[in-house]
Amino acid sequence: MSIENKIKFLMRDAGKSRSDIAEALKISEAAVSNKFYRDSFSAEDLIKIAECLGFELALVNDNKKIIFDMNDIKLNSKPDG
């Protein structure tokens, strides 16, 4: 299942629309539609979408689980300049 389809499934489950996703990503609905069409979401996008839908973005393997949140993105951002 593509990332696009997984997000759409979770959106239906959470009762959220593309407009909710656009607001969470701080982009236009047209830009969200483009991301869906191209199936091109950054790690930051996925974290924001997960939070918007009431989920956590995580890597899971057996008993190991690593959860990602916006603090991870902020910690790895390079300062401008």
Image: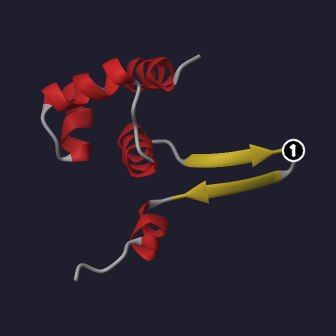
Q: Foreground residue, 76 or 72?
A: 76
- Please state if 24 lies on the left or on the right of 7 as rendered: left
Image quarter hosting the N terminus: top right
In percent of width and height, residue 67 lies at 61, 56
In the image, taking residue 48 as reference, residue 10 lies left or right, namely: right
Residue 29 drawn at (x, y percent): 15, 28
Q: Quadrant of residue 68?
A: bottom right
Q: Give the position of the C terminus as an image quadrant.
A: bottom left
Where residue 39 appears, as percent x and y from the top left, is 41, 25
Q: Residues within 10 Å of mark 1 (few under 14, many from 20)?
A: few
Is 49 left, or right, of 10 in this rendering? left
Looking at the image, residue 55 sits to the left or right of residue 63; the answer is left
Which residue shows up at 46% across the image and 72% down it?
76
Foreground residue among 42 and 15: 42
SS for tag 1?
Answer: loop
Q: Residue at x 25, y 45 (%)?
A: 25
- Residue 30: which quarter of the image? top left
Residue, x 87% and y 44% (percent of image)? Answer: 62
Q: How many marks?
A: 1
Residue located farthest toward the front when viewing the structure as drawn: 81
Residue, x 18% and y 47% (percent of image)?
A: 26
Q: How is the image coloured?
A: secondary structure
Find the residue positioned furthest to the right.
62
**Camera-side residue of 25 and 17:** 25
* Above or below for 77 versus 24: below
The residue pinned by badge 1 equals 62
Q: Amino acid at mark 1?
A: Asp
In the image, is residue 27 above or below residue 36? below
